[in-house]
Image (cartoon, helix red, strand yellow):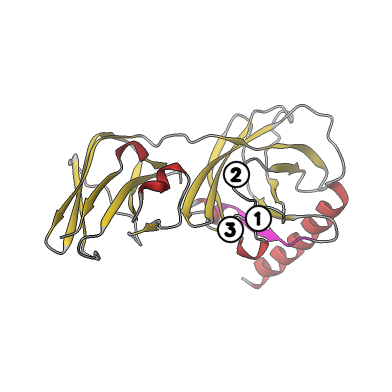
């Protein structure tokens, strides 16, 4: 354990040093990897990026992506709010670091694999960072990424992330909210699901969250609602409601690779009795 801690400290120092020296270096090679992101609103100005990294093999035969970073400009991201939330088992396969801004270099998220990394032709999903957005009215968007040689810290590739909201393999056919005495019952139907890790329930007291206003949005479920074998119907009871107040509900599903899908087309509402 001590050796691993020392190793992590050494790697962190080397990464910081390499970033200071190499961020200003431009690569002339073709793009070797693609970094895509899902943007997940968490309420207020809090968000989560979930990254998908693809190695197309153009770095060379047998060359894996084993060290990469993503830049967080302090003008748009509250540096002190950055938090790594990559789920298991991916977080046990990679060493992840948050590198503080230094000199003229912005903060960065860095991921290092001491094993095989991302081999040519492979895609790995689920790297995740939460943050507070201070970039104004526009939603969080593209970031700069760099790929380094893990042994020499040579900058192999530099590019920008691209947006994707890949759906998880869950087909939702119905989602309803029904007010009963002192509670609201949510029910939803699934026509098809594959690699589904479970569901989260989201709630707001205004429908503006569908159009960019997340000020009243909260996640009701602390833990994922587990999928039910051989069942196409699910339910959840919200008993933390106030009489005569209208609540709006949305459903999120999460696949086993860390991808989230928000089913905004199925938002429903009910007024508590």
Q: Which residue is mark 2?
A: 138
Q: Secondary structure at mark 2?
A: loop
Mark sitting earlier along the chain (3/2): 3
Q: Quadrant of the C terminus?
A: bottom left
Marks 1/3: CA–CA distance = 6 Å
**Is residue 88 visible to the viewer in this orientation of the structure?**
no
Question: Would residue 86 appear left or right of 240 to someone viewing this image?
Answer: right
Please report the residue visible at 58 percent of the width from the left and 58 percent of the height from the top.
132
Q: Percent x, y for residue 60?
A: 74, 29
- Report the front residue among 208 and 223: 208
Q: Quadrant of the N terminus?
A: bottom right
Marks 3/2: CA–CA distance = 13 Å
Q: Percent x, y for residue 34?
A: 64, 33
Q: Which residue is mark 1?
A: 77
**Is residue 51 visible to the viewer in this orientation of the structure?**
yes
- Report the front residue among 185 and 224: 185
Marks 1/2: CA–CA distance = 12 Å
- Please state the extent of the stretch shown in magenta in the rendering: 93-101
Tell me if label 1 and label 3 are in contact, CB under 8 Å: yes
Mark sitting earlier along the chain (1/3): 1
Using the image, determine if residue 70 lies above or below residue 98. Answer: above
Q: Percent x, y for residue 28?
A: 84, 30
Which of pointers 3 and 2 indicates the residue nearer the eye?
A: 2
Using the image, determine if residue 232 lies above or below residue 103. Answer: above
Q: Which residue is mark 3?
A: 132
Please report the residue visible at 48 percent of the width from the left and 50 percent of the height from the top.
41
- Number of numbered tags placed on the structure image: 3
Mark sitting earlier along the chain (1/2): 1
Q: Percent x, y for residue 65?
A: 67, 40
Using the image, determine if residue 159 lies above or below residue 100. Answer: above
């Amino acid at each position: 354990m001590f050796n691993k801690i020392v190793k992590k400290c050494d790697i962190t120092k080397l990464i910081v040093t390499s970033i200071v020296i190499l961020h200003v270096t431009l690569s002339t090679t073709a793009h070797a990897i693609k970094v895509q992101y899902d943007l997940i609103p968490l309420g207020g100005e809090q968000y989560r990026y979930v990254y998908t990294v693809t190695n197309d093999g153009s770095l060379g035969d047998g060359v894996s992506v084993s060290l990469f970073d993503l830049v967080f400009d302090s003008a748009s991201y509250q540096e002190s709010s950055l938090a790594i939330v990559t789920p298991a088992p991916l977080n046990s396969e990679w060493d992840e670091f948050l590198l503080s801004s230094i000199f003229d270099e912005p903060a960065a998220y860095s991921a290092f694999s001491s094993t095989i990394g991302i081999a040519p032709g492979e895609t790995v999903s689920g790297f995740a960072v939460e943050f507070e957005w201070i970039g104004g009215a526009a939603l969080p968007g593209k970031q700069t990424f760099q790929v380094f040689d893990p042994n020499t810290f040579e900058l192999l590739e530099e590019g920008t992330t691209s947006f994707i909201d890949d759906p998880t393999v869950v087909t939702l056919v119905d989602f309803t909210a029904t007010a009963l005495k002192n509670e609201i019952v949510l029910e939803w139907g699934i026509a098809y699901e594959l690699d589904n890790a479970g569901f989260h329930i989201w709630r707001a007291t205004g429908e503006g969250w569908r159009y960019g206003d997340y000020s009243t949005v909260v996640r009701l479920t602390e833990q994922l609602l587990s999928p039910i074998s051989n069942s196409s119907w699910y339910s959840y009871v919200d008993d933390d409601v106030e009489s005569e107040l209208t609540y709006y509900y949305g459903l999120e599903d999460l696949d086993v690779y860390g991808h989230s899908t928000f089913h905004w087309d199925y938002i429903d509402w009910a007024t508590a009795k």
